[in-house]
Amino acid sequence: MHVLSEVQNISDTVVAKLDILEVDVHHLLDSAKADSPNDVPLNSYYHFDSTGKKLKSKWDSYDVDAELDKVDDDTATSALRRPTSSPDQLRRKVGELEHEFEAILAYLDTVRGDEEVRIVRKQLVGAINDTYLVTLDRLKGQLA
């Protein structure tokens, strides 16, 4: 049982890394979404077509208050932000965590013991397979 508690501690450390990675992926996806241009075609030069119909310009849907709030938020949190990771770095971290979970699973396969040890080992393996590796696959799909 002592060995399994040590494996559980190692697994908890890897899960903490997984949580941090998940937050980083969400920040990357949110920043990519915020940086993408609007899908509305805008015309900033001609404001009317040949029939006299007013063309849409970027100023028709521009919300000054929202932009000012965004600037205020950016300046307030700029000191709190940490450097963002690139998608390649995050993909590499996903692979590293996947490797760490696979190593834990391989070690758990070597652990033998009585019924209580078998039950705890099965719970650890189930948590890794059903939760953590599924989360890694989902993150890998989001980064693709």
Image (cartoon, helix red, strand yellow):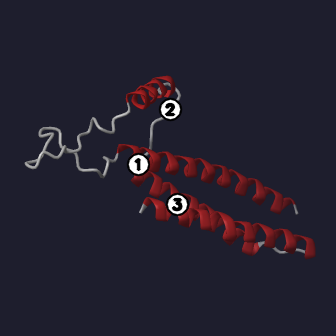
Secondary structure under tag 3 reads helix
Identify residue for label 1: 33
Tell me the residue at 88%/63% (across/down).
Answer: 1
Q: Nearer the viewer, mark 1 or mark 2?
A: 1
Q: Are marks 1 and 2 in contact (CB under 8 Å)?
A: no
Q: Nearer the viewer, residue 96 or 133?
A: 133
What amino acid is labelled 3 in the image?
Leu
Residue for badge 3: 139
Disc with the residue nearer the chain's start (1 vs 3): 1
- Tell me the CA gap for discs 2 and 3: 22 Å
Q: Residue furthest right?
A: 115
Q: Nearer the viewer, residue 80 or 89?
A: 80
Position of 132 relative to 9 (above/below): below
The single residue placed furthest to the left in the displayed view is 50
Real-space Cα distance between discs 1 and 3? 16 Å
Regarding mark 1 in the picture, which secondary structure is present there? helix
Identity of the amino acid at label 1? Lys
Q: Which is more N-terminal, label 3 or label 2?
A: 2
- Asked where in the image residue 46 lies, by quadrant, the reply is top left
Question: Does residue 3 appear to the left or right of 10 in the view shown?
Answer: right
